[in-house]
Image (cartoon, grey):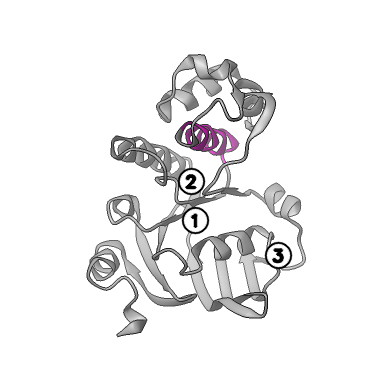
Amino acid sequence: MLELRNLTVKKDGKSIVKNVNLHVNRGEVHVLLGVNGSGKTTLAQAIMGIYPYKGNIFFEGKNIDSLSVWERARLGITLAFQEPARFEGLLVKDYLILSAKEKSMENVKLAIKTVGIPYSILFEEIGENLSGGERKRVELAAVLLMNPKLAILDEPDSGVDILSFSLISDVILRMKSHNSSVLLITHSEDMANVGDKATILCEGKVAITGERNKVKNMFKYSPCPLKR
């Protein structure tokens, strides 16, 4: 589904992501673990086409290096940002309808129920009146309604309470049941439990990729194995 070959991203002359090779299969939840500053968000935004990079990205066997953000989105790739955007004046219900692959209020209601937010929020604006956690859940509902081929979720558990982990896991598993692939970016061992495979990113480099529990346990005791 997604293949990265020797992906390198530089900012201000400094390499943030360094020769990353990564493969995400169709219908797979692949967890990208790493401490803050390890390059996870930069990698995600490069995949989406936000940052220029060296190396190659293949999606469904097609090289997408020359494609814009919007062209990648049309192919079925979506990115849920770590800090969701604010849209003053835009109601949640209108944002979700615009996002939905199938324009149905019944689907919208099901999505907000899945992410654990009340029906009344549909009539709120996506702005300062919503907390960061609420906006993050609204964005997750939007991703769910998009039914993407590949969802890149950048720390969806950041800024939400511990009780929300199960709700976020339910959203991810629902995506998987619809045959979507998920690249889940997190620094939480608990959040990693929803994955099939996992990769540790350390100082911009892949330290290890493999079966989830093996990689998660390594991350627990050595968050950056390359520093050994």
Q: Secondary structure at mark 2?
A: loop
Q: Secondary structure at mark 1?
A: loop
Residue assigned mark 1 = 26
Q: Nearer the viewer, residue 192 or 133?
A: 133
Q: Secondary structure at mark 3?
A: loop
Which quarter shows the N terminus? bottom right
Give the amino acid at mark 1. Arg
Residue occupying image coordinates x 56% and y 68%: 3
Furthest toward the front, the residue is: 128
* Circle 2/circle 1 CB separation < 8 Å: yes
Residue 33, x across and y down, in percent: 38, 63
Dividing the picture into quarters, in which one does residue 117 lie? top left
For residue 179, the mark is: 2
Q: Nearer the viewer, residue 204 or 180?
A: 204
Q: Residues within 10 Å of mark 1 (few under 14, many from 20)?
A: some
Q: How many marks?
A: 3
Q: Is residue 104 left or right of residue 182?
A: right
Residue assigned mark 3 = 64
Q: Is residue 94 above or below residue 32?
A: above
Dividing the picture into quarters, in which one does residue 186 lie? bottom left
Q: Earlier in the sequence, mark 2 or mark 1?
A: 1
